[in-house]
Amino acid sequence: MVTDENAIQADASLPEKVPFWLDPQKRAIVYQIGVLCMFGLLAYYLISNTLINLEKQAIATGFSFLNKESSFEIGETVIPYSAASTYGRALVVGALNTLKVSFIGIVITLILGTILGVSRLSSNWLVSKIAAIYIEVMQDIPILLQLFFWYAIFYESLPSPRQALNPVHGLFFCNRGVIFAVPETHPAHQYILLALVIGCIGVYFFRRWAKKRQDATGQALPVFRISIGTIICLPLITWLVFGAPIKMDVPELTGFNFKGGMTLSPEFIALLLGLVLYTAAFVAEVVRAGIQSVSKGQREAAMSIALKPTQVLNLVILPQALRVILPPLTSQMLNLTKNSSLAVAIGFPDFVSVANTTINQTGQSIEGVALIMAVYLIFSLSTSAFMNWYNKKVKLVER
């Protein structure tokens, strides 16, 4: 009898076997396998059907066209390029143009958006209302219309090169763009740039050391003034060591256009203005929301210890607001990069424009579109990865 009771207890302690269709974990695995199989079958159908249609139309596939001669010119290039270059190099030029306008646009947008966001909360009624009107107007006008507007300004409002506006020596405004003087090429320039990089690296490590010293001793150093002095003085000393070259390459009107100096095309300026002015309005709202997320008591506590308004903003408000600002700010930076693809509407040779020309000449539409998606995916993921890294670096650590 005792043996039977022990057997019954042992059977009761064993887990009850449940059919797999009633087990949630096993069902989830089966569903995932099913979805994966359906996705694989759909991909196989689309790829095989596409290859069959391309073969029927005698259209070659693959990326071998990248090594062929492009036979078209590109108006603006960061690296040397000619019509004799390959399609691959043409696409690299387009990608660099996109990267150039996106990087410059992001930097200016962050500065302008932060100023507008802070101005929106200003106690000065006029400053606050001007910032509010700017934000409302720019957010309500589609970016494509803004690009057309700024592009038309150059071609309709500005004169031809012969009647170019010349407000100061070496600076010209005309329908060919903005032409201005730049320093002539000199061996000292690369060493000045190197000195600037070394200065920035030195400032980075100095700021880290100064922060550790302040945490340990409570004594604050004039970090800002020392940093600015280092960044300015090192290149200046290098410039003086190489004889202080000051000769400028001044643009001169030759025939129907200017020769010398540097030219910013109407397409580039219109694209940059449209992207910056449009995105800065959204960044301003992100900054305003982040600042308002900091409790009023933080500001009052900072003012009670006799901190100046600028110190309250820089040392107390903005560091706490960053944890609210950074996630939506990342989205706005990604939007600016992706909106740069609208450059094709005003003729700026960005990656989309160059890829479209390549597709029209080679007929490799699938490969061209795949390259466009891959390039913008790389740009977006790189921007997102950097912002996520910075977000983790500056986030507040709970104690």
Image (cartoon, grey):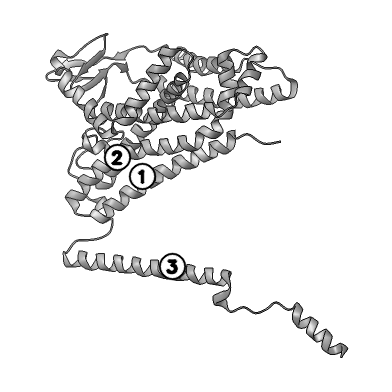
Q: Position of residue 322 (x, y in %)?
A: 54, 31
**Amino acid beneath label 1:** Tyr
**Secondary-structure class at tag 1:** helix
Q: Are marks 1 and 2 in contact (CB under 8 Å)?
A: yes
* Front position in the image: 88 or 95: 95
Mark 1 or mark 3, which has the lower sequence index? 3
* Residue receiving disc 1: 376
Residue nearest the viewer, comparing 196 with 56: 56
Tell me the residue that label 3 is attached to.
35
Mark 1, other Cα within 10 Å: few <14 / some 14–19 / many ≥20: many
From this view, report whether residue 163 is shown above or below residue 151: above
**Earlier-in-chain disc, 3 versus 2:** 3
Q: Left or right of 38: which side holds 78? A: left
Q: Tell me if 183 is positioned left or right of 244 in this view.
A: left
Q: Residues within 10 Å of mark 3 (few under 14, many from 20)?
A: few
Q: Residue at x 26, y 56 (%)?
A: 366
Which is closer to the viewer, label 3 or label 2? 3
Which tag, 1 or 2, sits closer to the chain's start? 2
The amino acid type of the residue labelled 2 equals Ser
Q: Residue at x 17, y 67 (%)?
A: 56
Report the Cα–Cα distance between label 1 and label 3.
Answer: 28 Å
Q: Residue 27: horizontal and vertical position, in percent?
A: 53, 71
Would you name the residue on which mark 2 appears? 341
Name the residue located 76 percent from the left edge and 77 percent from the top edge: 13
CA–CA distance in space, label 1 to label 2: 9 Å
Do we see residue 311 in this rendering? yes
User: Farthest top residue?
Assistant: 168
Pick the quarter of the image with the C terminus. top right
